[in-house]
Image (cartoon, grey):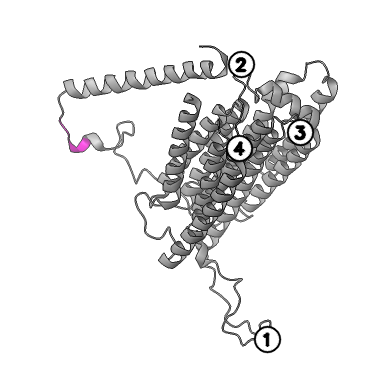
Amino acid sequence: MPLLLPVLLAALLFSIGIYGVLARRNAILVLMAVELMLNAVNLNLVAFDVWLRDRLLAGQVFTLFVITIAAAEIGLGLAIILLVFRNRATAALDELRDLREQDLAPAGRLGESGTDGGTEPAVTS
Amino acid sequence: MDGFYGGYGLVGLLLLVGVLFVTVAFVANGLLRPTVPGGDKTVTYECGVDPVGEGWAQNHIRYYVFAYLYVVFAVDAIYLFPWATVFAAPGFGAATLVEMFVFIGFLAVGLLYAWKKGVLSWV
Amino acid sequence: MTVEVLFGLLGVVATGSALLVVTTRQMVHAALWLVVTLGAVAGCYLLLSAEFVAWVQVLIYIGAVVVLLLFGLMLTRAPIGASVDLDASMAQRLAAAVVAGATAGVLVVSLVDAFRGEHIALETDRPRGHSSAVGAALFRDWVLPFEVLSVLLLAALVGAIVLSRRDVSEPAERGVT
């Protein structure tokens, strides 16, 4: 099998994941796109492991590790999203801008003005 | 039909036969039976009672922790498979046995934490 | 030859369903298309003779991670049916498409240039990624990362419990089960 076949598939999946991360607004859909990117990396690892006939089987073992870490990451990411949803009743990423730079403040006095304050969290519980 | 691809080819063939069987059965069924669509037939069946609310309810967040516990222990389980094939092989032995129990021990601490925090109590 | 054709077909399935994951307007459909993508990638692993990794992909990704994602969708009250506010503004989507296209272009050009004509010699009698081979590698050469991974999982589990714990005096429950 040509090495290009799996490697190009991985490149396409990675690019689609990048599009998803940048274009989606809902946090859970962004997490799904991150999963696509991780899968592209895994495919690369397996393809190069088989191609190089690595003695330590590094590619496949790393793939197992990446899958494990992805499981840990998705669990924590979803827990954070659920916490945000509980406090604000939204999972849209572009509404979470409390930490944004205060663009109304004059240059050089960014640290002092804080009256803008961001949106109040809509506590519903 | 032997070797790596032959074995999985056989599995794929069986899968194909299964899918074809079900498809043919359902298509034949659809051609032969009378079709009388009606309002009550599309209602969700809830043991004879009229369904209340929609089918898509919001879960309590407590169940999220149960789901995540399942994921963590599923990840743990997939390491048990390769471990089970090698720990008795020559060159491995007691050290490998202990290594897996260290791994499980760490995860058991997590389970213990969940238990102490009262996550596991089913309300 | 059949292996290449099968791999190509699986690649088309994976790419198409991945595109649907990032463009569909129904959130639950996105999760289900993700299942199709992950399954196709698992088939690719199988064709690359990484047998164990393929089944781990099925068990962990399709069996566990997607379930967790569906849980997340239920807990955030994802609507059934199409919703309009899943995507960012048109300008941002265009920018995202440009970035993704540029990444794909750079990657494809450089990969084709680097690996044209290279071939993977697959062993057909005994797969490379047999579970005993993975086990031998894992428990001979990769023991320390493996143990560190258990600490990572413990930390993630504790973190998830802390983040999703209801605090002492429970206010009126918002969710009904």
Q: Are marks 4 and 2 on the same chain?
A: no
Around disc 3, counting alpha carbons within 10 Å, would you say few (fewer than 14), some (14 to 19), or many (20 or more)? many
Q: Amino acid type of disc 2?
A: Asp
Q: Is residue A25 visible?
A: no
* Labels 4 & 3 near each other (Cβ < 8 A): no
At 54% across and 68% down in the image, what residue appears?
A: A121
In the image, the segment drawn in magenta is B36-40
In the drawing, does residue C99 fall left or right of residue C53?
left
Return the residue at label 3: B103
Report x, y in % for residue C177.
46, 44
**Residue situated in front as seen by the camera: A27 or B56:** A27
Residue C46 in the magenta stretch? The answer is no
Q: Amino acid type of disc 3?
A: Phe
**Residue situated in front as seen by the camera: C97 or B87:** C97
What count of labels does the image hold? 4
Q: Amino acid type of disc 4?
A: Val
* Labels 4 & 2 near each other (Cβ < 8 A): no
Return the residue at label 4: B71
Q: Are marks 3 and 1 on the same chain?
A: no
Report x, y in % for residue C165.
62, 51
Q: Amino acid type of disc 1?
A: Gly
Q: Secondary structure at mark 2?
A: loop
In the drawing, does residue C142 fall left or right of residue C122?
right
- Residue C125's disc is 2
- Residue C29's disc is none
Q: Are marks 3 and 2 on the same chain?
A: no
Q: Chain of mark 2?
A: C
Return the residue at label 1: A108
The Cα atoms of the two marked residues, 1 and 4, are separated by 49 Å
Q: Secondary structure at mark 1?
A: loop
